[in-house]
Image (cartoon, rainbow, N blue to C red):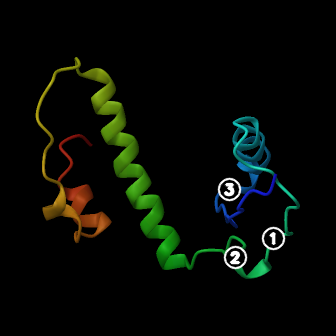
Amino acid sequence: MIVTMSRVTVLGPRRLQADVADTVQGLGSLHIDHIRPSDVSIAPRALSDHDQAGREAIDAVRTRAEAILALLPAIEIPPVATEPYAGQSPDALDRRSFLR
């Protein structure tokens, strides 16, 4: 029997590559002919000092927020719009913090 085939490209962390391939192949909907070696042009890159500082500041705000949320009881509320904060710098977000 001849079956029409499609080419599929899956992008994601290399550490999950084998698990994803096994899972999808296990569903019976995919046959992997070969896995092409990764292209170095899409390899992880080091962040600039400025970007790394921004990432660390955002991670610190997130960590504090998660710690505060872990202390609070779970309640059902409608989602809060976060769009107004999207353009703010990590420093501005940090100044909004109530805990020090």
> Quick one: label 3, few (<14), some, or many (20+) residues within 10 Å?
few
Location of mark 2 (residue):
42
The image shows residue 23 at horizontal and vertical percentages of: 71, 38
Q: Amino acid at mark 3?
A: Pro
Task: Give the CA distance from mark 2 to mark 3.
Answer: 11 Å
Observer-nearest residue: 49 or 29? 29
The answer to which of 68 and 17 lies nearer the viewer is 17
Q: Which residue extends farthest top?
A: 73
* Secondary structure of the residue carrying numbered label 1: loop
Residue hosting label 1? 38
Q: Mark 2 and mark 1: span between their CA atoms?
A: 8 Å
Q: Position of residue 83 (x, y in %)?
A: 17, 61
Disc 1 marks a residue whose amino acid type is: Ser
Q: Are marks 2 and 3 in contact (CB under 8 Å)?
A: no
Instruction: Using the image, determine if residue 13 lies above or below residue 65.
Output: below
Residue type, mark 2 in image: Ile
Of the numbered discs 2 and 3, the one sitting upstream in the chain is: 3
Above/below status of 50 relative to 55: below
At 22% from the left and 17% from the top, the residue drawn is: 73
Residue 44 at what x, y percent from top left? 69, 70
Q: Is residue 66 above or below residue 32?
A: above
Question: Which of the pair 12/48 is nearer the observer?
Answer: 12
| Label number found at residue 13 | 3
Q: Left of 3 or right of it: where is 47?
A: left
Residue 76 falls in which quadrant of the image? top left
Q: Quadrant of the rendered structure where residue 41 is?
A: bottom right
Left/right of residue 35 with respect to residue 16 in the rendered view? right
- Quick one: 30 or 56, which is closer to the camera? 30
SS category of the residue bearing label 2 = helix
- The answer for how far apart the CA atoms under marks 1 and 3 are is 11 Å
Q: How many marks?
A: 3
